[in-house]
Amino acid sequence: MRTLITGGAGFIGSHLCERFLAEGHEVICVDNLITGTLSNIDPLRANQQFTFVDHNISHPLEVDGPLDNVLHFASPASPVDYLAHPIPTLKVGSLGTHNTLGLARAKGARYLLASTSEVYGDPQVHPQREGYWGHVNPIGIRGVYDEAKRFAEAMTMAYHRSHGLDTRIIRIFNTFGPRMRLDDGRVLPNFMGQALRGDPLTVYGDGSQTRSFCYVDDLVEGIVRLLRVDFHEPVNLGNPDEVTVLEFAKEILALSGSQSRIEYRPLPQDDPRVRKPDIARARQVLGWEPRINRAEGLRRTLEYFKAKVQGDKPAGGAEPARS
């Protein structure tokens, strides 16, 4: 099997590259490193089955030889990143999706789009199921990411219906684990970085907004299973074990043994109040549900961030935590 993964040097993308290599695939990793890092894939580059291509997938890409799978994971995915790169975010969700769909069609490859729980916006339905159309502010500051992914889903389904392309769509809920960047801007790396440095943990609003955290190994397993079944509608992949941001901050403090205090800041515009996946479809179609609970996942991830904090030691305080 020959598999191309855009965003392959990113957090989730690098774990996918590793998994497919382990299963004997030849893997082509495409990334322009706007948010991905070469350190994520350095251990893979000695493998003769692995190729890294430094390319912005918002521009067309030619690939010699056959492809069996095209997985489109390229996009800034945290508020810090997509607010810093709003136009590239819109382009990779639109032009990048169009380019990768065209590539998959030309090669007769199976296609998988990495979408997001952000297509549900600030939801008025809880938990969020795939049939819910969402509550999104298209011109708000988060709209550049939300609408890029909603467009990408529409384009993917159009290629499936019009061209018969063999497509898959996953909606990824909050995912965590090793290879997240300390400056990612999302709540988990910020809380861990702040706790390990002794900085205040920044909580937006009163911390009552909820998130649901899935360990990256579980997510990757769900993605692999979806590629193996004949199903084309979106599938939520995430952990339905919901927790408030304030409770989560306290968990990080207890786990790390940090004496950091909690500091409250105003809630950002359009910040979702709740986030919890309904995974009934994943259970039924894939026989999938998370196996690694949050406590175990956090223990594994803390060891990674200890090494990162010791190695990076950035000057000054960390960025405020976002989610």
Image: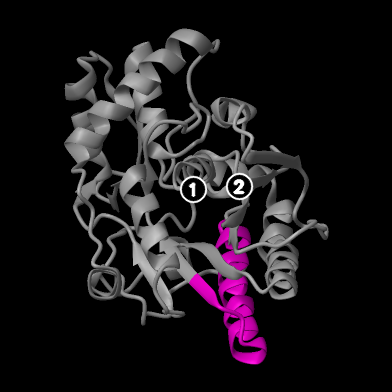
Q: Residue at x 23, y 69 (%)?
A: 283
Residue 161 falls inside the magenta stretch? yes
Where 62 falls versus 109 (above or below)? above
Q: Residue tagged by mark 1? A: 20
The stretch in magenta equals 142-168
Q: Residue tagged by mark 2? A: 27
Q: How many marks?
A: 2
Q: Which mark is residue 273?
A: none
Q: Residue at x 21, y 43 (%)?
A: 292
Query: Are dots 2 and 1 in contact, CB under 8 Å?
Result: yes
Question: 151 or 158: nearer the eye?
Answer: 158
Residue 268 falls inside the magenta stretch? no
| Prevailing SS of the magenta stretch | helix
Q: Quadrant of residue 256?
A: top left
Looking at the image, tell me whether mark 2 or mark 1 is earlier in sequence order: 1
Dot 2, how many residues are within 10 Å of its Cα: few (below 14), some (14-19), or many (20+)?
A: many
Q: Position of residue 128 (x, y in %)?
A: 31, 70
Q: Residue at x 61, y 40 (%)?
A: 49
Colouring: one colour
Where 91 falls versus 76 (above or below)? below
| Residue 77 at least partly seen | yes
Distance in Å between CA atoms under marks 2 and 1: 7 Å
Q: Position of residue 208 (x, y in %)?
A: 24, 49
Three-letter amino acid code at the position of disc 2 = Val
Three-letter amino acid code at the position of disc 1 = Phe
Q: Position of residue 61 (x, y in %)?
A: 81, 57
Q: Position of residue 222 (x, y in %)?
A: 35, 58
Q: Secondary structure at mark 2?
A: strand
Q: Residue at x 73, y 67 (%)?
A: 103
